[in-house]
Amino acid sequence: MLTQLQITSAKSKAKPYNLSDGQGLVLAVQTSGSKLWRFRYRYGGRQKTLHIGPWPATSLADAREKCREARKTIAAGLDPALEKKRAKVTARFAVATTFKDVALEWIAKCEREGRAEITLDKIHWLLGMAYPLIGSHPINTITPTEALSVLRKVEAKGRYESARRMRSILSRVFRYGIATARCDRDVAADLRGALTTPRTVHHAAIIDPRDVGVLLKTMDGYTGQEVTRMALRLSPHLVRPTRRTALGRMDRARFRQGGLVDPHREDEDAASTPGAPLAASTRDDRGAARDHRSSPVPLPVHGQPEAADV
């Protein structure tokens, strides 16, 4: 075993050399004169080296104590060098462990990934409602009950859809905390069935042409997002109105003025035509009804002269 005098009197040489203390612990003397403690061991059938620290910052007694801890780690079936690396990673992320710190770090990651500005604004808004309750709590100590209390506060205002989206955002923050070794589980994932499902509200169709004019003027005067403004201006031209809406009635009127067959009334006209085949008025054989219906403009039959040539 080494003594303090041997360590102090060890001088550098042309090549690095080791002074053994026994049981795998050695003092490596470098050509520059620096002295480093190292622990040599075998793990998984391979020779490995664990760097303990420099001398004199790490004394002989400290080096022997760390060597004993490394042997205990090997006896437990673990690699001490790998465990040391894991401890460094954990210590680096342990500085910021509150929910708000982890959430801001995750948002910064979303910004680097190029998320849309409007998406980031929604995330900031949703998380801003959670910070007063759990923002200062260490993320690994937050319980499902505490996370549910945040969501219940939003639901109490009737914002069921916002509460549902907030649960999804909280879950993403917790999953990021798991990936960065700040917490062990996603407590928001357990709250999927605890929230009120938003109820879908269907709005009545506009059947008055004057109300359609008001709607079109409102759509044309929209000054929000450019993509939304373009979609609103294109929708009257791309979305086919049904016969029950005011636009549908206006569409039928244009067909009548042009002398064309109203596509909305095609079934009813075919069913009311005297002498029409039975298939035209039944709901069970609509395919046959379509075969015998006439088109708006008579077409010449192949092999027969047109009306002008007779």
Image (cartoon, helix red, strand yellow):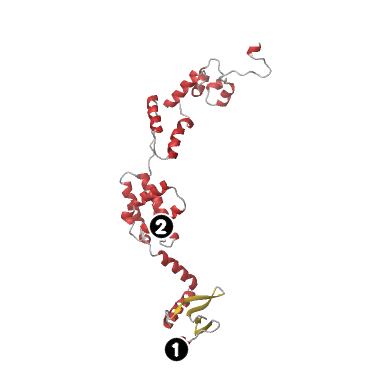
Quadrant in the rendering for residue 202: top left
Which residue in the structure is indicated by mark 2?
105
Which of 166 and 215 lies nearest the eye of the viewer? 215
Q: Position of residue 126 (x, y in %)?
A: 36, 49
Q: Quadrant of residue 63?
A: bottom left
Characterize the local packing of mark 1: few (<14), some (14-19) or many (20 or more) Cα atoms within 10 angstroms. few
The C terminus, quarter of image:
top right
Residue located beneath label 1 in the image: 5
Which amino acid type corresponds to the residue marked 2 in the rendered image? Glu
**In screen coordinates, is 46 left or right of 229?**
right
The disc, 1 or 2, on the residue closer to the chain's N-terminal end is 1
Q: Residue at x 34, y 44 (%)?
A: 159
Q: Residue at x 47, y 22 (%)?
A: 252
Q: Amino acid at mark 1?
A: Leu
Q: Residue at x 37, y 46 (%)?
A: 162
Q: Name, please, the residue furthest toward the top.
A: 310
When the figure is inspected, residue 113 is found, relative to residue 275, above or below; the finding is below
User: What's the mark number on residue 181?
Assistant: none
Place of residue 90 in the rendered image (x, y in percent of width and height, measured from the top left): 43, 66
Front-most of 148 and 9?
Answer: 9
Residue 97 in which image quadrant = bottom left
- Is 134 in front, or is 78? 134
Q: Position of residue 118 (x, y in %)?
A: 41, 46
Q: Is residue 247 above or below residue 310?
A: below
